[in-house]
Image (spheres, rainbow, N blue to C red):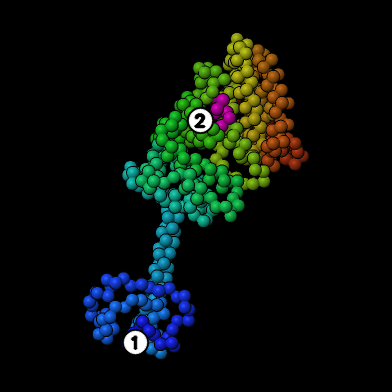
Amino acid sequence: MRNEENPPSSQQPAHTDTPILDIPSDVSSVSSSFLDEDQGGDTRTVSSYTYYSTWSSNFTRSNLEGPGRLLGNLYSRAGRVLEKNYYRLKNREVIKAYEDTVAVLRSGGIHGMIGSDDQQEHEKACEILLTCALSYDVRVQLDTFNLIGYLFITWPARFPSAFKRVFERENGLVDLVTFSWKRQSVEYTFEWLYWYKYASRCLKISTSGQSAFIQAISQFEGATERSLGFKHFEALLLSCNDKADLAFSVDLFHEHWNLRGIEEYVRSNGLGDLALVSCAIAFINRWERYFNPPGEDVALPLRVTVSLHFLYGIARSTRYLKSVELEEPSEYNALLEMWAHVFKLHHFLRSFQFFASSQAAYPLSLKSWRDFCTESLPDLKHEKLLRILLHLEVTYGALMSRQFPAEGGSLIDREANPTEHQFSLYRDDFDPDHNSDSEDGST
């Protein structure tokens, strides 16, 4: 073996500025068999080696790859193959787990998880929903957002609590999680955006702690479909802070209101009651959402009977107001404000194409605004009020028609184009007390 302090000229490195690796002096004093053998018994202190030293077993003297280098290359290639196969296997496992998760979502299995008494099952359901919400398939995302909204309304105490525990355990931030659901390169539909915001708000409410609104909606836990009178919704309506809260309240009305109780509520609180006004605005907001993107099919929850019976309840409550109550300026102004909301609801219902087929069940709302007001306030004592209410059509009619055009085939469209639609719009056998605030109002 050559002394590496004075290599032959043919072995000199091509670059004179090659960095020198200094070996500390204490290294030379270390007695080791492999060091002595490599130096052929020469134990003189080796002061430095260049990076181009040729004594390594990776190369032979003829600069051919030695067995060390060959073995290293073999191990390197084997490692790359092993790593590639490992990641391929992990990808398969991830894909399989994702497919199983989506299968649970679409099979309805999450309903059973949330409906059980096991909190771990509740949390597992939330984790499945979070996984599906992150999907690159927008259809899977939309189904997930819909289900989050449905479960939030159906289990308003259990479901938010489960999500809160999941986020606390994982130290997750709701805003970051929901932000990751939406990708900048994708152009989403109005329907997707609506349910994305809805589901995001569900998670936000679930993890925000005990607010007046979350306490109000938790009171609906365990309530059966259409089992509650209007009075039960007062705390909920009064706790709404924005349109998103009002949207939740509409869905709770759709699910639980028994279509009764407005007359009694008005007698106790008056037409200017804040909860009553909030309810009217909530219904109008939902209808505006439906009509806002013209030409786009939007699957929003619309239960026509809920808006109808709210409209009927206000009309009947006004009919039984005493003359002295109408002379009070505050009560009178509140009445006009409420009836402005009634006019807008009436316009939306008659602009809704599907509602045109409901004439047998709800003939009063099939009529024009004039006929609706006249039949709602038949007494002569309401003659002055009736004239004012009829003027609402002049005030709001053109604006509503311009902002929210009627659907083709709707009642308003049929009236505007009578020759295209040959059927009777009106019926004379309608009982105004039927399906309104009566005991059997369950339509």
What is the quadrant of residue 404 in the picture?
A: top right
Q: Is residue 232 above or below residue 80?
A: above
Report if the CB atoms under discs 1 and 2 are less than 8 Å apart: no
Query: How many numbered tags mark residues here?
Result: 2
Residue at mark 1: 2
Q: Is residue 283 above or below residue 85?
A: above
Query: What kind of element bears circle 2?
Result: loop
Query: What kind of element bears circle 1?
Result: loop
Residue at 27% over, 75% down: 28
280 within the magenta span: yes
Identify the amino acid type marked 2.
Cys
Q: Residue furthest right?
A: 419
Identify the amino acid type marked 1.
Arg
Q: Is residue 417 above or below residue 270?
A: below
200 within the magenta span: no
Considering depth in this image, is 214 or 204 the residue closer to the camera?
A: 204
Along the horizontal axis of the image, is 395 left or right of 9? Answer: right
Residue at mark 2: 240
Q: Residue 94 has which mark?
A: none
How far is disc 1 from disc 2 in space, using C-alphas? Answer: 89 Å
Residue 63 in the image: x percent, y percent?
Answer: 41, 87
Q: Main secondary structure of the magenta part?
A: helix
Q: In the rendered structure, which segment of residues is drawn in magenta? A: 276-282
Residue at 57% over, 46% down: 193
Residue at 42% over, 68% down: 88
What is the quadrant of residue 385 in the picture?
A: top right
Q: Nearer the viewer, mark 1 or mark 2?
A: 1
Q: Earlier in the sequence, mark 1 or mark 2?
A: 1
Residue at 61% over, 40% down: 290
Residue 122 in the image: x percent, y percent?
Answer: 37, 45
Residue 304 in the image: x percent, y percent?
Answer: 57, 35
